[in-house]
Image (cartoon, rainbow, N blue to C red):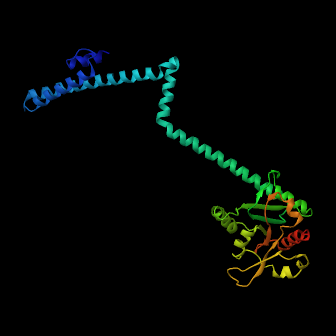
């Protein structure tokens, strides 16, 4: 406090003069000192030494003013914490200076935890799949198909198919909805294109619109030999579905209409028609044929 009083005295100001007065006084003294330093004599040197003391005093006063503002701010911000004001101030300062570091650290920890959980879930899923029996047949339903309201929540289609084929152990199925309305089906067809390119089921069960679309792309197996061979006794009029492809201008059988099969009603899907075809690169051709044969056998 004595140093502060001496600073005001050095500047020729009353104690605790307003900051505006301090600034104004310092400017005046600085101009006077510059004017005297233009004289090349001993008096100029004394003036310079005198002004250095003024500058030092000025700094002492400014530091006091800054502390006063800081103290007033702290009282306003942290006074409500009373005895804990110091701790609250330290915490606030820490958050101000290390906010982004703290957020980054939390995000990094969250990512690590998420990665660990995801890896554990992946390992658990892989272990679950490893314990399942081999897949007998993969079936892709594509078209204007939707699960019925009373369909079971867990594997409704797979369980229905296993009921029809009790000797088999496992089905894997997917449903790709594509509405029949051509004005609204464009976006759904884009997804169907992706499914067609990335998934490789053994058989497709399609409605008429999707059969016409898929059949022309060379994805389905030519069933002429099957239709003229072991399935011929089961094929009533209208069941073989013939069409041309982009690579073959002659008509061949690429699908079989199983809409009237009694087994179709056991699959919990809303549907208008069901046409089955075998994918050209099926891994289970024998079971795909057995699957079709059983559905055809239940058509009255």
Q: Residue furthest bottom?
A: 250
Seen at 58% across and 41% down, the residue is 106
153 is higher (above) or lower (below) than 276: above
Q: Quadrant of residue 22?
A: top left
Residue 75, percent from left and from top? 44, 20
Which quarter of the rendered picture does the C terminus lie within?
bottom right
Residue 273, percent from left and from top? 79, 66
Q: Is residue 7 left or right of residue 175?
A: left
Q: Is residue 99 left or right of residue 230?
A: left
Q: Quadrant of residue 62?
A: top left
99 is higher (above) or lower (below) than 212: above
Which quarter of the rendered picture does the N terminus lie within?
top left
Q: Quadrant of residue 281?
A: bottom right
Name the residue nearer the viewer: 152 or 162.
152
Name the residue nearer the viewer: 260 or 86.
260
Q: Is residue 115 left or right of residue 123?
A: left
Seen at 27% across and 22% down, the residue is 19
221 is higher (above) or lower (below) than 46: below
Residue 65, percent from left and from top? 32, 22
225 is higher (above) or lower (below) than 129: below
């Amino acid at each position: 406090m004595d140093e502060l009083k001496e600073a005001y005295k050095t500047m020729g100001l009353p104690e605790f003069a307003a900051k505006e007065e301090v600034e104004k006084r310092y400017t005046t003294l600085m101009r006077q000192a510059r004017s005297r330093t233009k004289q090349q004599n001993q008096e100029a040197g004394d003036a310079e030494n005198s002004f250095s003391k003024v500058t030092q005093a000025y700094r002492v006063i400014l530091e006091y003013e800054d502390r006063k503002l800081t103290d007033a701010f702290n009282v306003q911000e942290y006074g409500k914490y009373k005895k804990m004001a110091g701790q609250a101030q330290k915490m606030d300062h820490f958050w101000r200076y290390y906010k982004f570091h703290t957020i980054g650290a939390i995000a990094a920890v969250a990512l690590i935890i998420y990665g660990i959980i995801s890896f554990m879930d992946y390992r658990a899923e892989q272990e679950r799949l490893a314990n399942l029996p081999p897949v007998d047949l993969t079936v892709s339903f594509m078209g204007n198909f939707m699960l019925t309201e009373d369909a079971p929540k867990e594997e409704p289609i797979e369980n229905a198919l296993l009921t029809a084929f009790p000797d088999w152990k496992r089905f894997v199925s997917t449903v790709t909805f594509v509405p029949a309305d051509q004005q609204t089906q464009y976006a759904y067809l884009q997804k169907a294109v992706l499914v067609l390119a990335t998934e490789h089921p053994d058989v497709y069960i399609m409605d008429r619109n999707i059969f016409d679309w898929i059949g022309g792309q060379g994805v389905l197996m030519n069933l002429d030999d099957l239709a003229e061979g072991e399935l011929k006794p089961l094929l009533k009029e209208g069941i073989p579905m013939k069409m041309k492809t982009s690579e073959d201008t002659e008509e061949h059988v690429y699908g079989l209409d199983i809409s009237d099969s009694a087994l179709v009603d056991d699959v919990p899907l809303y549907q208008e028609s069901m046409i089955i075809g075998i994918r050209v690169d099926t891994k289970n051709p024998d079971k795909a044929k057995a699957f079709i044969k059983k559905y055809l056998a239940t058509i009255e």
